[in-house]
Image (spheres, rainbow, N blue to C red):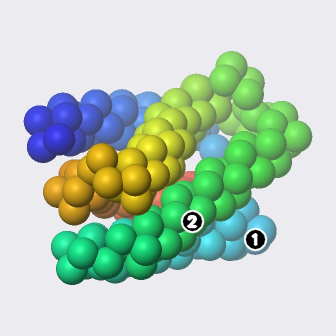
Amino acid sequence: MWLFIIADTMTFAACLVAYGFLRAASPNWPTPFKFSPSIVNVMAMTFILVTSSLTMLIGLRHAKAGNKAAAFRWILITAAAGAIFALLHVREWLSMIDEGVTLFHNPWGSGLFGAAFFSVTGLHLLHVTSGVIALLVVGIRYQGGRYNADDIEITGLYWHFVDIVWMFVVPLVYLMSISR
């Protein structure tokens, strides 16, 4: 898992550096986010994702203590938080698409914004969705006795990685694009 996380870190780093380069090199880079429902939605998404790291830790603690029922319950809570995050993210995407932002078009300025925004946030959303599926599969197999606390811990490493990546996406993609 550590090798995967290291490799995936390089992927996200490359995407975020490319996003930053495009942002800096485009004179008409848009600032579409206002302190409005869009940023409030991002704040809610961030709170949910950070809280899900805590629920993952609680689930792991119960798994290490041998309390399968409690561990499984907290893993399901973590997966539910991830699913809520994903739904809020999709809602945000649909809102931006309604405003005219697509991969190749942007009503506020550089057309590169849509491609860069959807690429970076889409890659993260893919990882969240994969994490939710992994949590459910590992949790069910743990509950059934096929997996142990170490498997929960490995899945937790991935989940925490997804959270940490979001802490880089929010400032670069959202906070630096708030209109004045």
The amino acid type found where label 2 is placed reads Ala
- Residue placed most toward the observer, 23 or 135: 135
How many other residues sit within 10 Å of disc 2, few (<14), some (14-19) or many (≥20)?
A: many
Q: Quadrant of the N terminus?
A: top left
The extreme left residue here reads 3
Q: Nearer the viewer, residue 1 or 93?
A: 1
Of the two numbered discs 1 and 2 on the same chain, state the one appearing first in sequence: 1
Question: What is the three-letter code of the residue carrying label 1?
Answer: Ser
| Quarter assignment of residue 42 | bottom right
User: Looking at the image, is mark 1 or mark 2 nearer the viewer?
Assistant: 2
Foreground residue, 40 or 142?
142
75 to the left or right of 109: left
Q: Is residue 101 left or right of residue 76?
A: right
Few, some or many C-alpha atoms within 10 Å of disc 1 (few <14, some 14-19, many ≥20)? few
Q: Residue at x 77, y 51 (%)?
A: 91
Query: Residue 101 location, x and y as percent?
Result: 76, 34
Q: Which residue is mark 1?
A: 36
Quadrant of image for the C terminus: bottom right
Q: Residue at x 45, y 52 (%)?
A: 140
The residue indicated by pointer 2 is 81
Q: Is residue 32 visible?
A: no
Element under label 1? loop
Left/right of residue 52 with respect to residue 80 in the rendered view: left
